[in-house]
Image: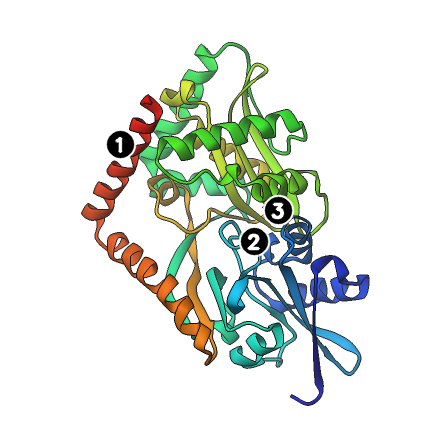
Amino acid sequence: MSAWRVRSVRPGELGEREIEAWRELRAKSGAPANPFMEPEFTLAVGAVRPRARVAVWWEDGEPVGFFPYEKGPLGRGTAIGFGVSDSQGGVFRPGLRPAARAVLRACGLVVWEYDNLEAGQPVFEGAADESFASPVIDVGEGYAAYEALLRAQSPKFLRTTLAKERKLGRQADGEVRFVFDERDPAALRTLMAWKSAQYRRTGRGDRFAQEWISTLVRRLHEQRTPGCSGVLSVLYAGDRPIAAHFGLRSATVLSCWFPAYDPAYAKYSPGLVLHLRMAEGAAAAGIGTLDLGRGAAEYKDSLKTGDVTVYEGAVARPDPRTALHWLRREPVRAAHAYVRDRPALAARAREALNTVARLRGDR
């Protein structure tokens, strides 16, 4: 412990030496190259979140560990980009395993919360309250191999989706085409408008109503780096976008993030068609894995080839303020878990949210 020195800085204060060390540690870790875990994502969040920080571990004059986080009031810390980041945790050289409480002290935190901690994070995994499956699509052997697998494991889903794609091609105004990496900002604005409407329609909070999230997404759409680039994929009918998805990619992983479609085309299941074309485009671009993100959904079960595990929880150290954070967090978490573990109750909760959303729309 005495050989380590820790300093906490704003992401924009990281030097090129530190950023390159972060990249190298991730590359050597053996973990999937999830773009949310790369320094470029933390740098982008730091540009829109003033409380973003990175704790850097130094040993013998070399940076050997990085812990990105956001620091809130009363010593509350959260994962960087908490609420939208789909992979979280620290980046440490092999053998460097600081105690969780030591990490909190170094950062001036009494608690650190996460909701998508990646597997293989021994410093924090022990404090997890729950684990979740995050479905993935493996296209490492190419799209043809993936489609053959779908024919075996989800034959009705594939047959129906491809039939709807052909029907769309016959009935749409203009040629149906797909762009894997669309750079037009107007297409991104269309996606964000669709997604906001979907959030409202389903009674969920509109993420894009939060300025920092919409600004972050626009910044990442412009970002082109090997470890973390924004990718906007769009399905068009003629010149009209009918489905779109924005996510982040590294050289080998596409992390799926914000999908949406034009409800006017709902009968063609354009979102499902889009995901098949995304898998095809990703394979052609050398990407081996599409991470669909945690959360149960029928379409994910049909598309996936497997799962990775992510964790939700919080680490804390003894402090009078810890009880305040527990009282704020634990009842809400327990209520969500109670509903989530009871499918019939969860279905009624979703129906209630949809009803409230419709009533708001009728005003």
Looking at the image, is mark 3 or mark 2 earlier in the sequence? 2
Closest to the observer: 181 or 320?
320
Q: Is 101 placed above or below 204 here? A: below
Please state if 210 lies on the left or on the right of 252 as rendered. left
Is residue 55 visible in the rendered structure shown here? yes
* Residue at the (19%, 46%) spot, across then down: 344
The quadrant in which residue 352 appears is: top left
Looking at the image, is mark 2 or mark 1 earlier in the sequence? 2
Distance in Å between CA atoms under marks 1 and 3: 36 Å
The quadrant in which residue 326 appears is: bottom left
Closest to the observer: 119 or 40?
40
Q: Are marks 1 and 3 in contact (CB under 8 Å)?
A: no
Please state if 195 lies on the left or on the right of 65 as rendered. left
Is residue 283 visible in the rendered structure shown here? no
- Residue 115 at x, y = what percent? 45, 59
Q: Is 295 placed above or below 38 here? A: above
Number of numbered callouts drawn: 3
- Residue 168 at x, y = what percent? 44, 17
- Which amino acid is tagged 3? Arg
Q: Are marks 3 and 2 in contact (CB under 8 Å)?
A: no
* Residue at the (58%, 36%) spot, across then down: 281
Q: Which mark is residue 147?
A: none
- Kindly state the secondary structure of the residue where label 3 is placed: strand
Report the residue marked by disc 3.
Answer: 249
Distance in Å between CA atoms under marks 2 and 1: 30 Å
- Kindly state the secondary structure of the residue where label 1 is placed: helix
Distance in Å between CA atoms under marks 3 and 2: 17 Å
Report the residue marked by disc 2.
Answer: 81
Closest to the observer: 274 or 18?
18
Q: Is 99 placed above or below 121 here? A: below
Report the residue marked by disc 1.
Answer: 355
